[in-house]
Image (cartoon, rainbow, N blue to C red):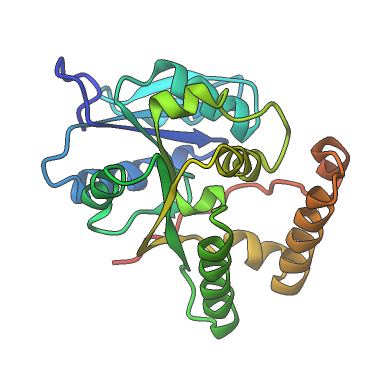
Amino acid sequence: MTSLDPALPELSIIIPALHEGPHIRSLLDHLTTIAKGTAYEVLVVDGDPGGSTLQYLPPDVQGLLAPVGRGPQMNTGANFAQAPTLLFLHADTLLPDRAFQQIQRAMKIAEAGAFDLDINSPRPVLKWMSRLASLRSRLTRIPYGDQAIFIHRSTFKAMGGFPDIPILEDVALMQRLKQHQIPISIVRDRVLVSPRRWEQEGIIHCTLRNWLILGLYTLGVSPHRLLHWYRPQPSPKLGLKN
């Protein structure tokens, strides 16, 4: 990793984290494996006031504290980022092997983008759901945060960053880009997302809940009112797939 490299990095990877300490090193090692010469920096933004995740970081990764919530945490990371391209990566999401090169190519023709989705589970229903989610994002050009959203830093700042809302900050930012007719690229290679939330909450419950929240938000219901429908769960072990 190159966050202490005096040369300007090509890519700033911003990881919002909450109680991810025992698992964050696996994700950082994965980024090292797929970098293939790309100069990048990593900024891990901890929502725990005690900085429990930051204690596990190697010295070449910048650790920051921010109020809990992905929006505030990712905005904090973006304020400290140096690279012209920002990549917002959830702590339970693994990038495809050619991700860095694909981001560089996508940013030549678009201002922002994300990847297709895959869920790290052999269960057919979760595979079907991931394909459906990828199709939805291609049709709407509104990817979710777990699809590893990337964006020009200048565009991100021009849009005001992620809005100050407790959930759906990723959807709100993508909607704002669409309203300004800013092109969004969807890369066909898939990120690999942990199935932990579906497994903890139940596939049907989690899926229907998410659809309901998005539908109500689209109809104009405030994310602050919708927050009680969505409760983050404690983070179990991050499952990595060879």
Rendered-image quadrant of the N terminus: top left
- Identify the residue shown where x is 80% and y is 48%: 217
Residue 195 vs residue 101, the one in the foreground: 101
> How many labels were placed on the picture?
0
Residue 35, quarter of picture: top left
Q: Is residue 141 above or below residue 1?
A: below
Q: Say left or right for 178 vs 83.
A: right
Note whether residue 151 is visible.
Answer: yes
Which one is in front, 178 or 79? Answer: 178
Q: Give the percent coordinates (x, y) of residue 223.
A: 80, 39
Image position of 18 with respect to 47: above or below: below
The residue at the far left in this view is 37
For the C terminus, give its image quadrant.
Answer: bottom left
- Residue 157 is situated, as x and y percent measured from the top left of the image, at 49, 22
Residue beneath the point at 27% across and 22% down: 59
> Foreground residue, 199 or 148?
148
Is residue 42 shown above or below 187? above
Q: Position of residue 76 (x, y in %)?
A: 52, 20
Confirm whether residue 46 shows in the render. no
Given residues 8 and 53, the one toward you in this image is 8
Among all residues in the image, which is located at the extreme bottom?
124
Q: Residue at position x 64%, y 47% from top?
A: 234
Q: Quadrant of residue 208?
A: bottom right
* Whether residue 126 is situated above or below residue 228 in the rendered picture: below
Q: Residue 39 placed where, x, y %?
A: 17, 32
Residue at left offset 69%, top offset 72%: 203
